[in-house]
């Protein structure tokens, strides 16, 4: 079984014609309804995270700054991060959605997907950025660690942007393996997420970046993830898995030059089911509304079925078609893989 954690109140983070706006969740929910998915999935309302939850990740000054900024009417926090008067409240609800999804998985759900906004993976300990105010995923993780005594976590983030906020929260933490595949940071926000950023102190080797050249498509992603994600995850052996999902690497997305097709999203959902088993999914970006809703339905269909055979079919189709028929892996992608392999050889064998 899978569950969605969602609230209509997420619309109240009112951003007008900003690309991260309430239509994003509206189109996803409408498509799920039209496709009949909502009859087969539990949709649960989140509760807002409490201050104690937020403060495991963020400073009190950040919490207070967001609160007073919204109380004063909101506006542009920085050049691209917008808050409305309700944003403080709704950002806490989004963090609570991630906690709720985590509880569901602990209680035996195969997967739980927090469909929330504002997103979270750029939010830093002491600042909002990149459309994000509180780091939903990090807040859920620290809740699991503190309240539910979980120990080892794997986060796989395939949003097209590097989740700098999440990465830096756990940069020195050997119990959180953060793996991110994203567009080469020399060419996209937030300008971080290079291979050399491997973690620090005790956490060295547990921040694994896979920067992809602009133009990379399904075959390049599938190659990289087959080579790296699965072996690293197996060797690490987490007891809790997060899939941080972004749909902005889609070929129709206005913000990136990555060229993923619709096929990638069911493929990665199946791959993660195979690697992780039960997992929590957290929505981040994705700004082409048609692609966003379509690909969410495809991804959720795989999670709903939970049928390994179905997944095998997906994988076989996508893999053989993309690998053998259309085109080969570029030399640049291979070079990046060898560099990652070399850099991580003290930590992981892949
Ligand atoms: Zn993004």
Image: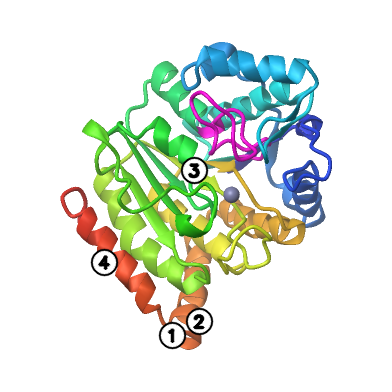
- On screen, residue 37 versus residue 52, left or right, reads right
Q: Quadrant of residue 48?
A: top right
Q: Quadrant of the C terminus?
A: bottom left
Q: Which mark is residue 324?
A: 1
Q: Residues within 10 Å of mark 4 (few under 14, many from 20)?
A: few
Q: Which mark is residue 163?
A: 3
Is residue 7 visible to us here?
yes
**Measured from the top left, where is residue 348 in percent x and y?**
21, 51
Question: Based on the displayed image, in which of its 4 quarters is residue 297 positioned?
Answer: bottom right
CB under 8 Å between callouts 3 and 2?
A: no
Residue 138, how many percent across, how many down? Answer: 48, 30
Residue at mark 1 to residue at mark 2: CA–CA distance: 6 Å
Foreground tag (3 vs 1): 3
Q: Which residues are magenta?
A: 114-137
Residue 338 numbered mark, or none: 4
Q: CA distance from mark 3 to mark 1?
A: 32 Å
Q: Earlier in the sequence, mark 3 or mark 1?
A: 3
On the picture, is 336 further left or further right than 246? left
Mark found first going from the N terminus, 4 or 3 = 3
Disc 4 on helix, strand or loop?
helix
* Residue 321: assigned label: 2
């Amino acid at each position: 079984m899978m569950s969605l954690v969602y609230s209509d109140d997420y619309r109240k983070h009112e951003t007008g014609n900003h690309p991260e706006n309430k239509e994003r969740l509206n189109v996803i929910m409408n498509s799920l309804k039209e496709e009949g998915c909502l009859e087969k999935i539990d949709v649960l309302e989140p509760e807002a995270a409490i201050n104690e939850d937020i403060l495991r990740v963020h400073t009190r000054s950040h919490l207070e700054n967001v609160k007073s900024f919204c109380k004063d009417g909101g506006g542009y926090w920085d050049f691209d991060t917008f808050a409305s008067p309700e944003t403080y409240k709704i950002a806490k609800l989004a963090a609570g959605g991630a906690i709720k999804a985590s509880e569901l998985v602990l209680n035996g759900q195969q997967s739980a997907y927090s469909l929330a906004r504002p997103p979270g993976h750029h939010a830093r300990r002491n600042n909002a950025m990149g459309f994000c105010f509180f780091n939903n995923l990090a807040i859920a993780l620290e809740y699991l660690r503190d309240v539910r005594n979980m120990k080892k976590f794997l986060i796989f983030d395939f949003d097209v942007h590097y989740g700098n906020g999440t990465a830096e929260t756990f940069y020195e933490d050997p119990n959180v393996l953060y793996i991110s595949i994203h567009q080469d940071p020399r060419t996209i926000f937030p300008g971080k997420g290079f291979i050399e950023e491997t973690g620090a102190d005790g956490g060295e080797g547990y921040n694994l970046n896979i920067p992809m050249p602009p133009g990379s498509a399904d075959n390049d992603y599938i190659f990289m993830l087959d080579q790296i994600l699965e072996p690293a995850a197996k060797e690490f052996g987490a007891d809790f898995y997060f899939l941080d999902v972004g749909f902005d690497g889609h070929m129709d997305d206005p913000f990136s030059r990555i060229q993923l097709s619709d096929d990638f999203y069911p493929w990665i959902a199946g791959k993660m089911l195979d690697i992780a088993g039960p997992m929590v999914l957290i929505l981040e970006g994705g700004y082409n509304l048609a692609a966003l809703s379509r690909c969410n339905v495809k991804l959720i269909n795989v999670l709903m079925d939970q049928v390994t055979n179905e997944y095998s079919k997906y994988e076989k189709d996508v893999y053989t078609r993309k690998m053998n028929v259309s085109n080969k892996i570029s030399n640049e992608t291979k070079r990046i893989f060898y560099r990652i392999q070399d850099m991580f050889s003290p930590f992981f064998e892949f």
